[in-house]
Structure formats: structure tokens, C-alpha cells
Image (spheres, rainbow, N blue to C red):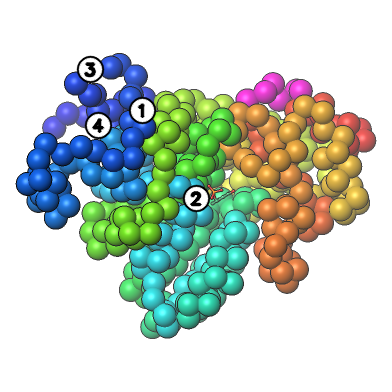
Amino acid sequence: MAKPFEPSTLGVRAGTARSQFNEHSEALFLTSSFVFDNAKQAAGRFTGGDEGYIYSRFTNPTVTMFQDRLAALEGAEACVATASGMSAILATSMALLKTGEHVVCSNAVFGSTVTLYSTILSRFGVETTFVSPTRIEAWRRAARPNTKLLFLETPSNPLGEISDIAAIAAVAKKAGAVLAVDNALCTPALQRPLEFGADLVIHSATKYLDGQGRVLGGAVLGAKGPAMDAVFGFLRTAGPSLSPFNAWVILKGMETLELRMLAQSERALELARWLERHPCVARVFYPGLESHPQHALAKRQQRAGGAIVSFEVKGGREGAWKVIDSAKLISITGNLGDVKTTITHPATTTHGRITPEARAAAGITEGLVRVAVGLEAVEDVKADLARGLGW
Ligand SMILES: Cc1ncc(COP(=O)(O)O)c(C=O)c1O
């Protein structure tokens, strides 16, 4: 058997399907539906006997190219693209859960994920227990006979806590539940959760897969089988679908994914080291630092530390807002995963809608600042932060 291609090659080449015009760059099929040769073919397509495109809510060649490229990078057999990262999490939940069932979720996931489980799915009789992302014993204790889904994000956002995917996959297996890992922060360029035993991988393609802050997108990946069939079934019926235009933008973004992830991680490590030495910084959270409590685990699971550096400023909210408001180069915005460095105050933005108790449990303090490091020269980023830190 031929040697499989390296990830950088897959990022550039995997999934490409040429039309009859033999275009070199992937084509954008901006069409809501597809034409059939005759009624018999239309009937065959709808019943599934005849493979081919029908309607872009669930089948579109540009979206298929995106799905196939991401599947190749994650080492997954199947991929379902969605309109956003949140709709990927919703589609997974709707596909796998029903009233009376139970979820165990890390308490350090994205704020909207907490809200989805705690206030929306709970209305449909799905109960969620939130546990520490790092205490395996807590996952074990939380699992019940009706637990169907374990959900985590590693590294977590914004504190960069690392969950041991293999250990939590073992808990899921024993409980007869599915483990879904949100891999938005690492992307397959740095971490491939399926290799550690996760059943499903979730993406907010809005982040590093696009990489340039242009469009929203998401995806669910896993082995071919009932779980992925159910995710596809939900998408086909309910329609939180990825637009072909967005799929095309993200597909092109993925061509530089590995380069960007490595370069942004390198800059993030340098910035984290600098912040660690800064007298006005109480604590730095970055898995690439030797001082990070799960540094060894991060090195086992990840190829690099990723691009999110969070730090606690002395002086609480006032100190944090001063750093943010003094930034002239860095963009004040909630998004991350861009080549442009962004800065956020998690307690009042991304995690502002969750309860103060949930925020405290997740370790989001008032002095916490999150920087999503981009591709600018790291010296310029340091100078921008130094102004507000007062050094
Ligand atoms: C880790 C993580 N997962 C999911 C999401 C949600 O993704 P989207 O904004 O594409 O819906 C985000 C958004 O910031 C995120 O950071």
C-alpha cells in the first residue's frame, strides 16, 4: 500500500473533486438545487438508490470537498458540515439524545455550549452534569446508566486546561456513551482526538480552519455508522447546513492550516514566556509553558501549544479592561482563530451569559484576559500589551 500523505499535503490536496472543466482551484457550486436527467433519476436520487446531488441543504459538491478534506486531516471516515460550530454541537446532541437521557460535559467548554446544555436541552428533558475537564474521577462518578454523551473541549477556552482524551474515552466506553471532543482550538494540524479514542470530533470551522475571520462554519466527524448517520439525518431534516460559499472559503483556508497553526503556536509560546516574566501579570495559562500543570499531557496529545494565551492581570476587572482598552494593534473582538491577534475579557463577553457560579467553577476571573495570537510580529504584540500593563 502506498504511504499515506502527510497532513500538510492533505490540507492542500485532500477532497479536491474536479468538474468537467478540469479547473485547478476548487470550484464554488453556488446553487441551491441540482437538475435531474429525468423523473426516474430524480426518484432514484431521493430514495438513495442513485448517488448524486439533490439539494444543498444536505448535498453540495463544494461542501463535500470541505467535508472530505477535513475528514482526511482528522483521520475520520465521515464528516457532516454545519452552519457553525454551535450547530455542529446542536446536531450532535439532537442526533444522539432523547428525553430522559443524560450528558456529562466539561465545565470548561465555550459559554454557548454551557447554555445549550443547561438551558435549552434541559427544556427537552436532557439533563447535564458539568465536571472538571481534568479530574477523571469526576467523569467516572458523573456517568449514569442513562448517560449517552460525554462532551469536552481540549485545550479549554480560555484557560487552556488539558483533558486526557484517552482516559475519558475509557470512561465513555465503560458507560456505553459517546465521547465528543471539540477540536476547534487545536485543529487536526495539532491534535487528532480520534487517535486517542474519541468517537466524534466537533469543529467550529469559524476559527482556525478558515483562519482569517471571514465566515462561520462547523463540522462533526467520526466513523461511518449509526451516530454519524443520525447527525446527517438531523442536518437533512432540520437544515443547519454549511453554505457552499462558506465551505469554499474554509476549504481554501485549510490549505495553509498547518503552516498557520505552527507559526501562531510559536508566537503564542514566546508571548506566554514574556507575560510570565511580567510583574503586573499574576498568572499565565498556556499549555506550551513548562509551568502549565498538564504540560506533559499536552505534549503527548498535541504537536504544539496552540495560539490561545490567557493571563490574569493584577487589579481585577479594572486592570484587565485597561490592558484591553490600551491596545492599538490588537483587535478587541470575541472571535479567535484569526491571523489578526484578538483580545477579549471572557468574564463579560464570551462567558458573560453563564451564571456567576458556573463562571467561578470554570475559573473565569474578572482579571482574566484572553489573547488569541495571530501572525503579526510578536514584538509588536508585546509592545501593544505592555502599554496597558504599564511596563
Ligand atoms: C471551542 C469552541 N467551540 C465552539 C464554538 C462555537 O462556534 P461558532 O461560533 O462557529 O458557532 C466556539 C466559538 O467561539 C469555540 O470557541
Q: Earlier in the sequence, mark 1 or mark 3?
A: 3
Q: Earlier in the sequence, mark 3 or mark 4?
A: 4
In the displayed structure image, the side of residue 8 where residue 289 appears, left or right: right
What's the distance in space between the residues labelled 2 and 3, CA to CA?
33 Å
The residue indicated by pointer 2 is 85
Q: Is mark 2 within 8 Å of ligand 1?
A: yes
| Residue neighbourhood size for the residue with mark 2, other residues' Cα within 10 Å, grouped as few (<14), some (14–19), many (≥20) | many
Residue 306 vs 85, above or below: the answer is above
Q: Residue at x 62, y 51 (%)?
A: 157
Residue 191 forms part of the magenta stretch: no
Badge 4 marks a residue whose secondary structure is loop
The residue indicated by pointer 1 is 28
Q: Is mark 1 within 8 Å of ligand 1?
A: no
Q: Are marks 1 and 2 in contact (CB under 8 Å)?
A: no
Q: Are marks 2 and 3 in contact (CB under 8 Å)?
A: no
Which residues lie in the magenta part?
375-380
- Three-letter amino acid code of the residue under disc 1: Leu
Badge 2 marks a residue whose secondary structure is helix
- Three-letter amino acid code of the residue under disc 4: Pro
The residue indicated by pointer 4 is 4
